[in-house]
Image: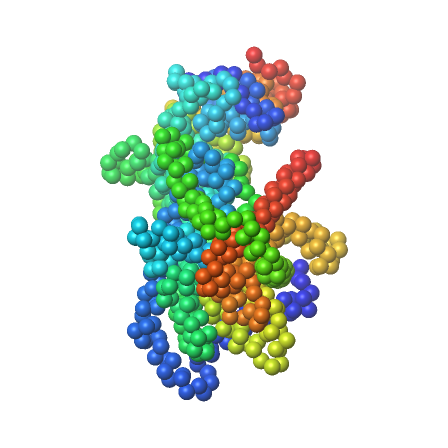
Amino acid sequence: MKPPRTLTCLGVLIFALTSLLPIVCITFAPFFGNDPRLTHDHTLLLGERHWRLAINSLAVAAGATFLALALGVPLAFLISKTNLIGRNLFSTVCVLPILIPPFMHAIVWSRLQQMIGPTTGLQVHSVGGAIWVLGLAYYPFVTLLTMSGLRVGDRSLEEAALLSRGKWCTLRHISLPLTTPHIFTGAIFVFVFSIMDFGVPDIMRVAVYPVEIFVQFSAFYNERAAAIYSLPLITVALILMILQRRLMRDRAYVSPGGGVSGVVSYALGSGNIPGFLFCCLVFGLSVGVPVAVLVKGAGSWSNYLRVFQTSVEQTLFSFSLAAAAATLAVLLALLLSYLMVRSTGWQSTALSIAVFIPFVVPSTSLGVGLIELWNRPLVDMIYSSPLIVVMGYLSRYLPFAVVTIHSGLKQIDQRLEEAASLAVGEWTRVMRQVVVPLLWPSILSGFFVVFVLSLGELGTTLLVIPPGRETIPIKIYNLMHYGADSSVAALCLIMTAASMLSAGLLLLFLRQTGAARLRSFDARY
Amino acid sequence: MLVIDNLQKHYGPIKALNGVTLRMFPNEVLALIGPSGCGKTTLLRLIAGFEKPLGGRVVIDNVEVSSPSAMMPPHRRKLSMVFQDLALWPHMTVAQHLEFVFKKEGRTKQGVREGIGGILQNVRIEHLRDRYPHQLSGGEKQRLAIGRALASFPSYLLMDEPFSHLDPRLKEELQQQLLTLNHQSNMGILYVTHNMEEAHAVAGRLAFMDTGVLVRMDDTRDLLERYSTERAEGFEPIK
């Protein structure tokens, strides 16, 4: 069954205008035009500064990836595969670190340096500091993906091994290799996120590509240099994403509604206490320390009230933009995923590659691309409105919505749809009454992921936000540069609390939906 | 001897096993038959040590291996199992499957190689040693699953509807091969199925289960004569 042609064309057009054309602009801008700086710009990729940027960017991304693996993989195994004390609690809270945007971690550790640096020698404004902060901010992606791999695995594969070898041998030779694609995918995600990140290296004062792109564009108005500095990042990230797609193919990603029950669990014995302490340490560093430092910095309740009162407009603006982007993203992702799953041949392959291209573009480059494309008299209405920010969010986070909805759609038996199409024959009705209700948890998950990530977006927003408007991350960023530390801390906490509230509501809804489904299943069978 | 004594297992309000008692001799083939959801697989999982019983015990060759208070790890029970879905490891070749099992014995490399060769020859897949499970046909996968189970030289082999997805001809061929292996190795086989004909083809004795209890145990031929293929409703549970 195919969607109406008009709808397909409209969806593909929106996708092209918001996601693909800005990237085409930034990628091909260096090679066209008569700008006299062009000759000089071509030497940018061979200069000494470029090599320093390349080394720093790769060091930060590789270091953060290793740290994320060192924290995320053991954590996932302890929570999913052992009888660890408090594993249900850890399993519930493991999504919390994602709700704290990376730049907030950077603010926290910068502040810690101010507080304890002189006595302890803590120095976070360095490549090592950026690695530490990015590793702490992004390890949950490794944890969640590894947990997803461990939970969807067939338990009889491990039981078959347990009959002939012990638990550690089974863990090493069966459980771990079977989860390797998920672990590797988590590592690639962290690498790409880290190499593209703007907020953390900017706050940590580390010269990397995304910061340089921002500086070249906003300080020197040199969009060609910004575009040229984007190319190495896009190339590396593109190679990694192709590798990741080959590894994962159609495996499911993360299910925030809770894992599958009935996985093989290993008794930790005397290792239970060290395991528990390790989990406490990781959650302490990634959630406890940020919250504690921010609470200490925010001061009294009156400060929260004052900050909230002066930030109502920005809060509402941020939430409206994130909600608009998330709604558009799930609608577009639903259509694109449907086309990817149900169509065959080159169209499906081309679409599945195109959808992931925005993922490999740095946030600052995307901002430059959007400006290049939309800053024209004919479309000034769009460029000077909040719609340009929504486009930026949509472009950056659409791949996440597609991943979530695509894997949900793959699990729906096509015969259910075919049976409905025999009865009604109208695509929109079949989607509304059969596909969407079955896909509801995936749609909600996709909405949640795009919403939360959009709330914390900084790199693209900084470049494209219309004059006189602010989102919460931009207000935090500006306040930080003015040295308003207590206001920054209070605003960070308000934003984190709002994200956690949204996450809590969604998880509650997903679990209730799951429970209701089980009840209706029991009633029928 | 494998002794199952008043074994009980509940999942919430559902009584999956409600006091099953059974004795199995070292070299016999015993078929466990019953409708879907009657507790056959649960019984196998308790014998294998994947789950802990709520009551009762499992004794293998005079050693208590499962009870509510004590559990011996699965790999020390002298058992093997052929799973219903075979549970072949997708990242290992045929030879690596057997190597994984053989290595536990602490043998020399030469010993492991010879052992693998012997098993592969026994189950007639020696030419497929470097293939991965997805490169095997249904029958070849089945042979690999049996070979892997035999590689640990178990005293008892548990088989959970192992041939349910095969065509009748292949099923018959593998059943005959299984009986040959049983005679050669002198191991007991607990064969779970819901098919009376299949049970008759492989087993000397037959145990009927229904709703978590063992309702009848008899010689296969006698039982077939008396009750044909009718369901075991109305039997009194064995005391």
Quarter placement of the N terminus of chain A: bottom right
Q: Is residue B184 depicted above or below A115 in this figure?
A: above
Rendering coords of residue A144 (x, y %): 48, 47
- Relative to residue A486, is residue B16 drawn left or right? right
Rendering coords of residue A486 (x, y %): 48, 55
Can you see residue B149?
no
Q: Nearer the viewer, residue A339 or B123?
A: A339
Quarter placement of the C terminus of chain A: top right
Q: Nearer the viewer, residue A209 or A320?
A: A320
Q: Is residue A421 depicted above or below A220 in this figure?
A: above
Q: Nearer the viewer, residue A300 or A500?
A: A300
Residue shown at the point (55%, 67%) measured from the top left: A392
Rendering coords of residue B107 (x, y %): 26, 34
Residue shown at the point (31%, 50%) measured from the top left: A119
Q: Is residue A211 depicted above or below B120 in this figure?
A: below
Q: Is residue A81 depicted above or below A143 in this figure?
A: above
Q: Quadrant of residue B223?
A: top right
Residue shown at the point (39%, 56%) measured from the top left: A110
Residue shown at the point (36%, 64%) measured from the top left: A206
Can you see residue A366?
yes
